[in-house]
Image (cartoon, rainbow, N blue to C red):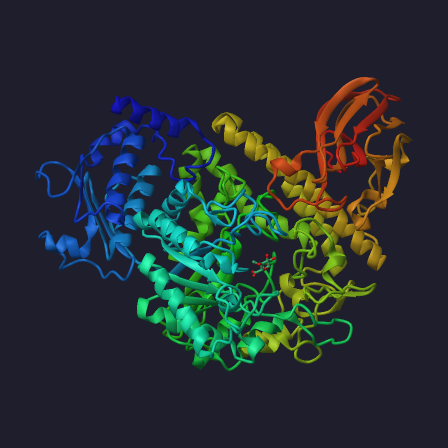
Amino acid sequence: MRGSLLLASLIGLAVAEDGLAAWLRYARIPGGKCHRKKLPSAIVTLNATEGLPVYTAGQELAEGISSMFGKKLTLEESGTDADVPTVTVGTVGAYSESGGDVEDLPELIEDGYYLHISGGDVLILGQNERGALYGTFQYLARLAQGKVSDESFASNPDAPVRWVNQWDNLRDGGTHGSVERGYGGDSIFFWDGKIRDDLTRAGQYARLLASIGINAVVVNNVNANETILTEENMDGLARIADEFRPYGIQLGLSLNFASPQTLGGLDSFDPLDETVIEWWQGITDSLYERIPDMAGYLVKANSEGQPGPLTYNRTLADGANLFARTLQPHGGIIMFRAFVYDHTSLNQDLDWKADRANAAVQFFDGLDPQFEDNVVIQIKYGPIDFQVREPVSPLFAHMRETGSAIELQITQEYLGQQAHLVYLAPMWKELLDFDLRVDGEDSAVSDIISGKRFNNKLGGYAGVANVGHNTTWLGSHLAMSNLYAYGKLAWDPSSEPVDILEEWIKMTFGHEQEVIDVITEMSMESWPAYENYTGNLGIQTLTDILLGHYGPNPASQDGNPWGQWTRADGDTIGMDRTVLNGTGNAGQYPEEVFEMYENIETTPDNLLLWFHHVPYTQVLKSGKTVIQHFYDAHYAGSAVAQSFVPRWESLKTKIDAERYEHVLFRLVYQAGHSLVWRDSINNFYFNKSGILDEAGRVGNHPHRIEAEDMELDGYRTYLVSPFEAASGSLCIVTADNSTQGTASTKLDVEAGTYNVAVNYYDQAIGNSTWELYLDEELVGKWHGDLEYELGRAPSPYIDGHTAARITFKGVQVESGSILRIVGTPDGEEPAPVDYISILPEDVID
Ligand code: GCW
C-alpha cells in the first residue's frame, strides 16, 4: 500500500506540470539508469532532529534520488558498512563528533558548505545545519542537471543577508489586493486579517528558497499593518516559522512605526519616548518567545504615507536604532529601508532642482556613524523605483560604517508584471558589477553590500518576490527564472546570468538542447527588448505611474509630486541631474562616477536622459538622434517580442502541454501588448515633437482599418485617454451596456491568405464577447477575460493597460469581402475595438 502511494506521488510529480514543484521537480533523468552505480545506496544524517535542516536534507536526498533515478536509498542515523556507497550529511561539528576527519576541510563561513563527491560516496558538510541543507540541494541540483562526475569543493555565501520580502497584506481588497504588486494570486500566508490555517504553501515556498540559498523571508508588506502584532497573529506567525524552520528559513517581519499608538493605545510613537521603547521591547520579547530564531525586522518609515520618526523631529537613525536595540538581546537584525522621500511636495514647475532621486542621500546624510551594529540599510538598486534602467543608487557609496543591502524586485512591477517575459538577472548583474569608485578605489556594488569593501559585518540582498497562491507561484512559469537567479546571484554575484538560466531550464524543462537553447536565447534577449519597447536612454519605464504601473502612459510621469519625471516638452526631454545646471544628483556619486555622469559626452547613451535634458534632435554616440532612437528602438524591441511566439512554438513537442500552453498564451499576449507599447510611445513623442520617423513607420499603418472608420451600428466612437493608447486616438464602444454593436467594412485587399489581427480593450469590469466574420463566416470569437488569465494589475479603463490584440492566422480573404465585427457588451465593458489589421504573411503591424 505504502509503495503504491509513493509511486502515485512520484507519478504525480512527473505529470502534474502545474509549476508547483518549480525547479525542484526531480524529473527522471534521461538515461538515468546508467548512472545508478555512481549514486549512493544509503543516506546517513548526522545528529538529525526532525524539523531541522539536516533531517530535511535526508528526506530530500531520498526523494530526489528515487524520483530522478528510481533508486531507493536507505536512511540511517549512523555509519554504514564501508562497502555501501553512502551520502553523509551533517554539520562540520557533528561530523567531527562522529569521528570524521575535519582537519583538511576548506574554510567555511556561516551557511557555507563543503561537498565531496567520489562516485557513490558523498560527503555534505555544512558550517551549520542550513549549510548542510544548501549543500544537499546543490548535490541534487547537479544530479538534476545530469552531472554525476566526481567533484570536491566548498561554497560560501558572498553576503550574510539573503532575504526575500513579500509584500503580503493581511487582507484582500483595498488598492492592492492580497499581495501588493503581486501577480501570482492571493497571499500564501494571510487571509481575512489572520494567518491562514493551512500553511502548506509556506513550507513549499521555504523549500524552494532554501534550494537557492535564501535564509529569511519577510512575510508581510512593508506598508505594514499594526494588527500583525495582535496576540493571535503573533501565534500565527509562529506557525509560519514552524513551516520555515525545517528548511533553515528564518522569519522576518515588517513593522508599522506607529503601532505603539494604533495598536498599543499609547499617545505617541516617538522613538525616544520611554513608554514607546518599552512597548516595542515587550513586542520583540514576546515574538522571540514564540519564534526564538526570528531573523528580525524590516521597516519602511516616512515614505509614501508610512509613519516614521520624522513626525517627532527624530532622525531616521533614531527610528532604526529603536528596533535595533530591542532586537540585540535576541540576535536579530533590522533592515531599515532607504526608500524615503516626500511624495507630496515635489514640484517640477516651481523648482528645476527638485529631484526625488536625491532624496535617499539627503535623508541619510550624516547618519552613517549613528546606526547600531545590527542595522542594515536596505537600498533599492536605483535612486527612483525599480525602473527598466536606472544607475545604481548613490547611497551605496555613502554607507560605510553601516552595512547595506541591495533591494531587487523579482516581481516585475515596472517590467511587465509577469505578463511579459523579462529575465532580470542580466540587469541585476550589471548593477552588482557597477564600480562606484569610492575614494578612487575598486568599489563594486556587490563588494559594498557583502561587507568586503568597508569591512561591515552585515549586508547583502533583499529580493521582493511576491509569490502568490497560484501553482505557478509568480503567475508565469518563465518568470520563475528570476526567483531562481535572485538566490543564485545573492549567493555568488560573480555567477553569469546565462549559466544560471541554463541550470534553471534543465531542472525546470528538461535536458533537450533545443529547449535549453530556445529558452536561453529568448530570456537573454528579453530585458533589452522590454527596455526598447518601454523606455529608452534612461527615461524610465514610460508606464502609467498613477495607475497600475503596467501599460504605457508617458504623460502620467510629469506634473505630479511623485517625482518620476521625464520633463518632456515640444523640443526637449530628460532630467538635468548635473551639478552645473541641474538637480545636482550626479554630484552624489563619488568623483570618477560623478564626472562620467556630469558630462554628456561620457554619459552612456542608455542613461543619457536620466542625467541630461536634451533636444529630441540631440545626436547619440550611435549617430542617431534621440527621437529616431526612440522610434527605432520601439520597433526593434517589439519585433523581438513578436519572435518569441514562433520560437516557443518550435518547442511544442518537447514541453508538456500544460506549461507549453500557459507560456504560449502569455507570449502571444506579450507580442500584442509590445505593439501597444511601441505605437503608444512613438505616437506620443511624435505628437509632442512633431518630428517624423525617418523610416516612415510612425503614424503610418497601411494594413490597418480603424474601427471608427467602419460602418457602425450599435457602436459609437470614443476618444481614448491617454490618446496614444488608441490607433488614431479613437476606438469604438457599444452604444450602451446592453446593445450589441456591429462594425463592418468592405475589404480593399487582393484576394489571398492573411493574418487578421484585432486590437481591442479588455477591461476588468465585464466579459464582453467579440465575433469576427468574413462574408457571414465566423472567423473567430473571444471573450474579454484577460483579467482572469493574467495576474497583471487590472484596469477598469480603456487605456494602455487594457489594450490587447488577438490574431487569426491564415485567413482566406477575397477582394471585396465584407468584414464584420460584432461586439456584445457585458457588465460595464462595452466591447471596445481599436482597429483591425489585414496582414500579409510576415508583416506585423
Ligand atoms: O514601487 C513602489 C510600489 C509600492 C511599494 C513601494 C515601496 C510597498 O509601487 O507598491 O510599496 O514602492 O517599495 O515601498
Q: Seen in the image, is 656 located left or right of residue 673?
A: left
Question: Quadrant where the N terminus lies?
Answer: top left
Q: Along the horizontal axis of the image, is 114 left or right of 394?
A: left
Where is ligand 1, by quadrant?
bottom right
Q: Is residue 92 above or below residue 329?
A: above
Q: Can you see residue 437? A: no
Looking at the image, which is closer to me, 624 or 423?
423
Residue 483 place in picture, x, y as percent: 46, 48
In this view, 342 is above or below 502? below
Across and down, in percent, residue 611 comes to 66, 69
Q: Position of residue 511 (x, y in %)?
A: 40, 34
Front residue of 278 and 398: 278
Please say whether residue 565 is visible from this viewpoint.
Answer: yes
For residue 774, which quarter of the picture? top right
In this view, the residue in front, 647 or 725, is 725
At x 77%, y 47%, the residue is 725
Q: In the figure, is residue 789 to the left or right of 334?
A: right
Q: Which part of the image, by quadrant, shows the C terminus?
A: top right
Count all numbered tags in the image, as a single digit. 0
Q: Is residue 821 left or right of residue 443?
A: right
Quadrant of the rendered image containing residue 143: top left
Q: Who's the residue at 9% across and 36% down the image?
A: 83
User: In this picture, is 349 found above or below 496?
Assistant: below
Give coordinates of residue 691: x percent, y percent: 84, 57
